[in-house]
Amino acid sequence: MSTLKLWFRATRPWAYPASVIPVFLGAMLAVADGFFNPFLFLLTLAGGVLIHAGTNLFNDYFDFLNGVDTPDSYGSSGVLVEGLMSPKQVLKGGIVTVLLVIPIGLYLIAVRGPVLLLLGILGIFAGYFYTARPIALKYRGVGVPAVFFLMGPLMVIGAYFVQAASFNPVVFLASLPVGCLVAAILYSNEYRDINHDSRYGIINPSILLGRRKARFVYYFLIMSAYILVIVMVLGGLMSIWALLTLFTFPVALKPIRVMEVTSRGKDSPQLPFIDVLTARLHLQFGLLFICGVALGFFF
């Protein structure tokens, strides 16, 4: 495998929609309010993806260092457990990736003010300490709420603020469905890995609740995304076009069925891919939500 392809794999690009969708949503909400600068949008998108890539590299490094990533585990890029790269290389890659964010951040702060400094620091700090000790959010049961906040409200509001240089309460509300679904991706990952993670001292809601009860948290996250959109439409905060997201409900049923079957002690060949199924839902829901905002603006 070439060096470029190896680094591409190490950053886990298949996960990027989790950061791309909130940036696009925040920008589209700004367009609906009459604000849009394509250059600032591209910088925001690049910054969001770079932070995500750096977080993935740090996550691989610390999970491997802490003995959590093993040949029989899921979720990592696999470059460390397969011996394709050294831990030192991956750590340096994470540092370089985050350093690339700094000039982007400084420019955005210069044109939009110090509020973005706080948002950027929060994003980088949480990304690094997601698996880095002594905080290690993932190992202490707060990974799901952290991801909900960071890749939901924080990224959507940040992308909107870059365009509008102001806040809008509707933007916060609009960020919640996306936050719920990105949290569901991580939660499904934790649910799948209950047996593996419990052997390494990781604490998370799925392990504490057990499969039978843990499934209800997942159902809550999925259903909340749809309910929030419906409430916003009924409340006049979103146009009826936002209901396009309801067309993704059949997609949501696939991982729900997997969780329902496995929560009863039965095997499912789809369990190893439940996070992929949830990520697919997040992507399709997010795209239709963005389209709904756009159609509401034009029509």
Image (tube, rainbow, N blue to C red):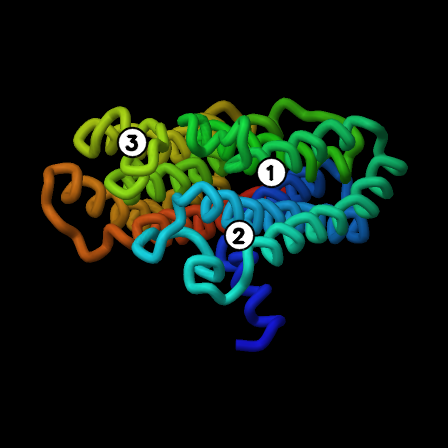
Establish if 206 lies above or below 269: above
Which residue type carries mark 3? Ser
259 lies above or below 122: below
* Disc 3 residue crowd, few under 14, some 14–19, many 20+, Cα 10 Å: many
Q: Is residue 104 left or right of residue 71?
A: right
> Which kind of residue does numbered mark 1 sit on?
Tyr
Checking the image for residue 206, the label placed there is: 3
In the rendering, which numbered label is found on residue 128?
1
Residue closer to the observer: 52 or 202 = 202
* Mark 1 or 3, nearer chain start: 1
Residue 257 seen in this snapshot: yes
Tell me residue 109's x, y (percent): 84, 35
For label 1, the SS is helix
Q: Residue at x 77, y 39 (%)?
A: 163
Of the numbered discs in the image, which one, if any, rests on residue 195?
Answer: none
User: Nearest the camera: 273 or 100?
Assistant: 100
Q: Position of residue 198 (x, y in %)?
A: 28, 35
Q: Residue furthest right?
A: 110
Q: Secondary structure at mark 3?
A: helix
Which mark sits nearer the N-terminus, 1 or 2?
2
In this picture, residue 86 sits left or right of residue 41: left
Q: Which residue occupies 44% across, 46% down?
A: 282
In which image quadrant can residue 190 be found? top left
Disc ID at residue 17: 2
Indicate the secondary structure of the residue bearing disc 2.
helix
